[in-house]
Image (tube, grey):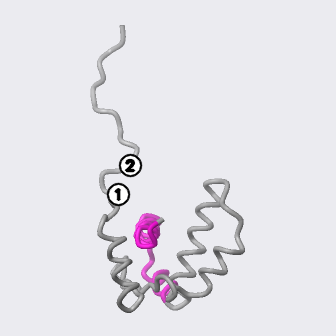
Amino acid sequence: MTAPRKSAPRKATPADAAKPDPKRSAQARKAEAEDGFVTVEQCGVKFRIGLGEDMPFEVFEEMSTRPEPQTEGEQREYNRAITKALLGPDQWEAFRAARPSIRDYNELSDNITALLGN
């Protein structure tokens, strides 16, 4: 006979984790139809990100020169490279200057991924 569980089982995702916003893909489509850019805020810094044909060419280069990520580590490196390319050098440095935590970076990356529809 086993003892009853004293507390509820832990959830795999923290309660305060960023939730996907269903409006994001609509926001991305609207941005592409208007001026091709969306704004994302993280760490008190606003980032202007080009979508579709307004995306920096460096993003295309990163995506086309890297093999498909096979491991979790490769996926993290791929996501970091794409995020850095999407922001460009000036915005990447502004993000770094804000002294972000890993959580801040993950939230920014998740928001960008949602905007791109991935």
The foreground one among 4 and 59 is 59
Report helix, strand or loop for mark 1: loop
The x and y percentages for residue 44 are 33, 81
Assess whether mark 2 and mark 1 are in contact (beta carbons under 8 angstroms): yes
Identify the residue at image location x=41%, y=72%: 115
Residue 88's tag is none
91 above or below 43?
Answer: below
Snapshot quadrant of residue 82: bottom right
Q: Residue 105: image x %, image y %?
A: 46, 70
For residue 63, above or below residue 56: above
Q: Check the image and name the residue furthest to the front.
A: 33
Q: Residue at x 29, y 18 (%)?
A: 4
Residue denoted by label 2: 13
**Residue 10: % across, % down:** 35, 38
Q: Residue at x 33, y 59 (%)?
A: 19
Q: Residue under circle 1? A: 17
Q: Residues within 10 Å of mark 1 (few under 14, many from 20)?
A: few
**Amino acid type, callout 2:** Thr
Which is nearer the eye, 15 or 67?
Answer: 67
User: Considering the numbered disc 2 on the image, is that residue within a helix, a strand or a loop?
Assistant: loop
Q: Main secondary structure of the magenta part?
A: helix
Quarter of the view holding residue 25: bottom left
Let me know if residue 100 is in the magenta part: yes
Verify whether residue 35 appears in magenta.
Answer: no
Q: Is residue 107 visible?
A: yes
The stretch in magenta equals 91-117
Which quadrant is the N terminus positioned in? top left
